[in-house]
Image (tube, rainbow, N blue to C red):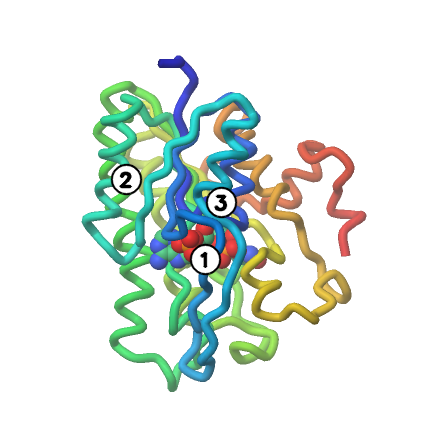
Amino acid sequence: MTDSPVAVVTGASRGIGRAGALALADAGFDVAISARTVKEGQGVAEPNSVREERTLSVPGSLERTAEEIEARGQRALVVPMDLLDREAVLELPATVLREWGRIDVLFNNAIYRGVGTLDRIADLTPESMTAMFTGNFIHQVLLIQAVLPHMLERGRGIVIDMVSGSARHDPPGPPGEGGWGILYSASKAAFGRVAGGVNAEHRAAGVKAFNVDPGNVITEARKAAKPDDDYEAGFGSAPAEATGKVVAWLATDPGADRFLGKWIFAPKLCSDLGLLPGWSMEGSG
Ligand code: NAP
């Protein structure tokens, strides 16, 4: 048994969740990691529109992220979970509390990424709308509900919710032509209201919540979808590690409280605080 604080990170098999898990390990947390892909080679990115038929292989796995956490001298706990599976969602915090006895930080990063994500309004179905709001809102709120009693009992806890600029802006074009699907952005807009509610209801009792927007991040899944794109040309992108560093900073620095109630644009905060050596927004594409 160590007395390291414990973070739970969803969607930690790759992308921003992996970066957050590693930054939290660097900051001294033991990290419980969750997603669907357990072993390297099993990862898939499903079609995210009814007009798209390909299921792609994507790198990354919970086992690999766990090795990277352990290489940093912290413990890793692999808890597979599909966001659409309510029992598995609720089993995640229960397993962490059973195995490690505490949860200091919950980083709600995973999303449901299936059909509907990049669909046009005419293509949306009751099924895709139900799946998206179940994965991106309802089950994420259940996860927060599940950790709250423990955090309130201890009188402290931090929830970090991953939001998206698409929740605040109209798309510049149709999905796939420079824009995004309204189902994705609407589910993120709904989720973006949750942190403020946690703060209004529980801040006085020691539990606080942040909304973090990662900007445009070219993850493994996006590279798998369009391997030939020159992603760095034309529009700004930030590395996943920038958001990872911000998440670890919010989880550890008392000065982070000034960002409660704000929409935190992670690349700017990372850049302003110099959290990622060698990277700044100014120097990015
Ligand atoms: P990503 O690379 O596709 O990673 C998504 C993560 O979520 C993976 O670990 C994936 O693992 C997991 N996941 C996918 N479907 C899941 C399911 N049904 N159940 C449980 N886990 C599931 O995505 P990302 O770009 O890092 O995105 C992470 C967060 O940042 C999301 O909340 C996203 O909305 C937000 N965001 C990203 C960007 C960007 O530019 N990348 C911009 C704005 C907001 P498995 O496949 O192994 O389950």
User: Which label sits in the foreground, 1 or 2?
Assistant: 1
- Hey, what amino acid is under mark 3? Gly
Q: Is residue 203 left or right of residue 164?
A: left
Q: Is residue 130 left or right of residue 212?
A: left
| Rendered residue at 56%/25% (across/down) | 72
Asked which secondary structure carries label 2, the reply is: helix
Asked which secondary structure carries label 3, the reply is: helix
Asked which secondary structure carries label 1, the reply is: loop
Q: Is residue 150 left or right of residue 106?
A: left
In the picture of the structure, the residue carrying the numbered disc 3 is: 17
When the figure is inspected, residue 270 is found, relative to residue 11, above or below; the finding is above
Give whichever of 244, 260 is nearer the camera: 244
In the picture of the structure, the residue carrying the numbered disc 1 is: 43
Residue 164 seen in the current view: no
Determine whether the beta carbon of the residue marked 3 sits less than 8 angstroms from the nearest atom of ligand 1. Answer: yes
- Hey, what amino acid is under mark 2? Leu
- Hey, what amino acid is under mark 1? Gly
In the picture of the structure, the residue carrying the numbered disc 2 is: 92
Q: Quadrant of residue 253?
A: top right
Q: Residues within 10 Å of mark 2 (few under 14, many from 20)?
A: many
Question: At which x and y percent is residue 268?
Answer: 66, 44
Determine whether the beta carbon of the residue marked 1 sits less than 8 angstroms from the nearest atom of ligand 1. Answer: yes
